[in-house]
Image: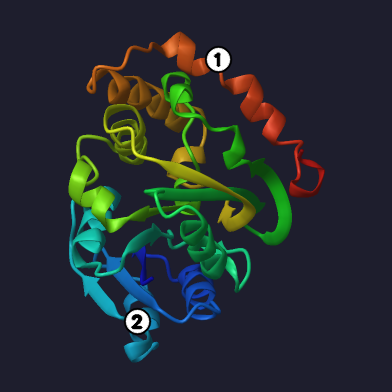
Amino acid sequence: MKLSIITVCYNSASTIRDTIESVLSQSYADIEYIVVDGGSTDGTQAIVESYGQRISAFVSERDKGIYDAMNKGVALATGDVIGILNSDDFYEEIGVISSVVEAFERRPDSDIVFGDVVFVNADNLRKITRFYRGKQFFPWKLRFGWMPPHPASFIRKSAYQRIGMYSLGYKISADYEFFVRLFLIHRLSYSYLSQVLVRMRSGGASTAGLRSSLKLNREIVNACRSNGVYTNLFLVLLKLPFKLYELHKRPDDAS
């Protein structure tokens, strides 16, 4: 099984080396690594280019935002399965991709395998600030604002070919809308891998304060409604107490 890992970036010089190293250090051999840059001006391009042919494909050009960059990466991917790792995230350990492949091999009918993520302090990558457990997800929860952790989700290329790419009509939640189509419209099959796969630095676009949170939740409502799935802002906001609980949860005390 060939895995395509896609990293999209823009002015990510301070973090992208961690991301790249976490991919290139994976113990699984058959990995195609694609980096799509939005035309960075801070040295990001030089860092990526310093890895030479260890990066399978590198594109650097202006784009229409993060989801346009993801679409470019997906279009370039030749692997059986695609994972997207953003430029401020990194894999938890060197065996992550091997574990994902084993999960697909155990359940060959699965179109998607997802696991857990931890959020960490941007200044102290060992300090966990939130634990997001994928096991809590079920497709019906999309109506209530729940989705699998996108960076810890690995999706067959054939699923993208069936349901399409990420919509450019969303600034923060195109991955959410994609999952609505994947799980609720096309009802593709999935497996959960009980393992932390990714560490995410706190402060990304979807975790960057109240204004961003309100925009995110409004886009979630629109993502459901545009696909004929009923929800409203009140239903989506019901998840907030559970999100607060995640701030106190840790991987070693989850059940």
- Which picture quadrant has residue 60? bottom left
Q: Residue furthest right?
A: 253
Q: Residue at x 39, y 58 (%)?
A: 84
Q: Of the residues under marks 1 and 2, which one precedes in the sequence? A: 2
Screen quadrant of the N terminus: bottom left
Left or right: where 9 falls relative to 117: left
Q: Is residue 199 above or below residue 18?
A: above
Image x and y of residue 180, in percent: 33, 31
Q: Position of residue 181 (x, y in %)?
A: 28, 33
Residue that numbered label 2 is attached to: 55
Q: CA distance from mark 1 to mark 2?
A: 42 Å
Q: Give the quarter of the figure containing the C terminus.
A: top right
Q: Is residue 173 left or right of residue 98?
A: left
Q: For the residue carrying disc 2, how many other residues have a C-alpha within 10 Å: few (<14), some (14-19), or many (20+)? A: some
- Coloring scheme used: rainbow
Q: Say what secondary structure mark 1 lies in.
A: loop
The quadrant in which residue 239 appears is top right
Determine which of the numbered discs, if any, sits on residue 203 in the image.
none
The amino acid pointed to by label 1 is Leu
Image: 111 above or below 212: below
Mark 1 is surrounded, within 10 Å at the Cα level, by few (under 14), some (14 to 19) or many (20 or more) other residues, namely: few
Determine whether the residue tagged by mark 2 lies in a helix, strand or loop.
loop
The amino acid type of the residue labelled 2 equals Ile
Q: Is 249 rendered above or below residue 47?
A: above
Q: Position of residue 133 (x, y in %)?
A: 62, 41
Q: How many marks?
A: 2
Of residues 50 and 177, the one drawn nearer to the viewer in this rendering = 177
Give the numbered dot on residue 238. 1
